[in-house]
Amino acid sequence: MHYIIFDLEWNQAMDPSRSVPGLPSEIIEIGAMKLTEDLQPAGRFETVIRPQVYKRLHHHVRKLTHVRADELESGLPFAEAARRFLAWAGEDAAWCTWGPSDLPELQRNIAYFCPELSLPWPLFYYDVQKLYGLQYDGRNTGKALEAVVDELKLEKDVPFHRADADTYYTMRVMQQLDMKRLAPMRSVDYYRIPQTREDQIRLKFETYSKFVSCGFASPDKLMKDKEVTDLPCPFCGGPTTLLVPWHAGSTHNYLCVGTCPTHGKLRGKLRVRRHPSDVHYAVRTIRSVDEEEAKAITEKYESAKERRREQRREARIRKKSTT
Ligand SMILES: [Zn+2]
């Protein structure tokens, strides 16, 4: 196994109404580094890509990346750049990016320009931004790369925001991480969701489990599915008893509380997402909760229920008074 850290720069339509279906962003640069399992640099990949769809550089992109038009003119066509990149990365690559957006963008561009190429499925990767948060802040804080470089007091010897520079700094941050400990904390890429029930993804981590459903025609159908709303214990896999049913926690998020006879109270969380292919899928995580958190979820659920009851009562009264 080796790590491939990569970063992309992309361009888009000047006028959003001119955006081409299937290609909201066109990759113009790939920067990557290969790292050994001990996080030692073992190779470098850099390529500039000649735009074929959005030929004029969006002013945001020009400002942010300082890519020059003449550089792009002498770049490779995307299909050739992607073919070289994937061949260089090799089959044994553990993908690493800063944040979750580069792998979907890469796959979207591949699907548009060279669908004969593909990445493995399910596609796992290390989100270095998330791992940094987990190691230093105890959770994913979503900090910007430059802020983290400052926090770690790393020397800023290369200007930011070109793909090769961002890759370089991501590598420097990653070298500060305890990757042996963080190794199980892989992220799942959701660009291609499971196509069938048999393909649905079930992962077990030390402290929680994750389930990625296939696509459903509507969020309603999704929330009626027994497999989606199941709450197996993440530790023993056994059945649990629901204490607080699935209910809307916040927009597109559902929560529930259950209990395993052996492992105690658990919290289920469902994030309902819309996939670009116009179906809805769910990412469900289940983990332990302490009494305090279980109580907080229960109280919030009860008071929301009470509020709805109250609203129904008021609506009835209003209806009566108008008839
Ligand atoms: Zn259990």
Image (spheres, helix red, strand yellow):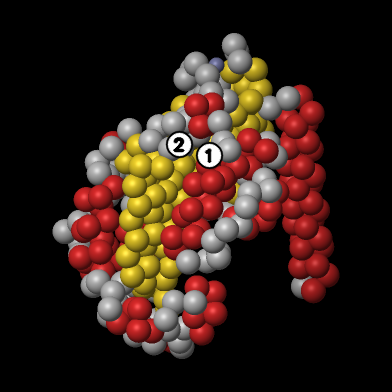
Q: Name the residue type under label 1.
A: Gln
Instruction: Measuring from the top left, give residue 2's x and y in whole percent.
Output: 35, 37
User: Which residue is label 2 attached to?
Assistant: 39
Residue at 61% over, 15% down = 263
Badge 2 or badge 1: first in the primary sequence: 2
Q: Are marks 2 and 1 in contact (CB under 8 Å)?
A: yes
Cα distance in 3D space between marks 2 and 1: 6 Å
Q: Classify residue 177 as left or right of residue 58.
A: right
User: Which residue is label 1 attached to?
Assistant: 175
Q: Name the residue type under label 2.
A: Leu
Residue at 28% over, 37% down = 92
Instruction: Measuring from the top left, give residue 98's x and y in whole percent.
Output: 51, 52
Q: Of all residues shown, which one is farthest toward the left?
A: 116
Quadrant location of the N terminus? top left
Quadrant location of the C terminus? bottom right
Which secondary structure, mark 2? loop
Number of residues whose C-alpha sits closer than 10 Å to that of mark 2, classed few (under 14), some (14–19) or many (20 or more): some
**Residue 71 seen from this side:** yes
Which picture quadrant has residue 294? top right
Seen from the viewer's position, the closer of residues 2 and 117 is 2
**Residue 280 seen from this side:** no
Which secondary structure, mark 1? loop
Q: Classify residue 74 as left or right of residue 245.
A: left
Above/below status of 119 relative to 52: above
Instruction: Measuring from the top left, give residue 229's x and y in whole percent.
Output: 50, 37
Instruction: Measuring from the top left, give residue 259's x and y in whole percent.
Output: 62, 21
Number of residues whose C-alpha sits closer than 10 Å to that of mark 1, classed few (under 14), some (14–19) or many (20 or more): some
Residue at 67% over, 38% down = 136
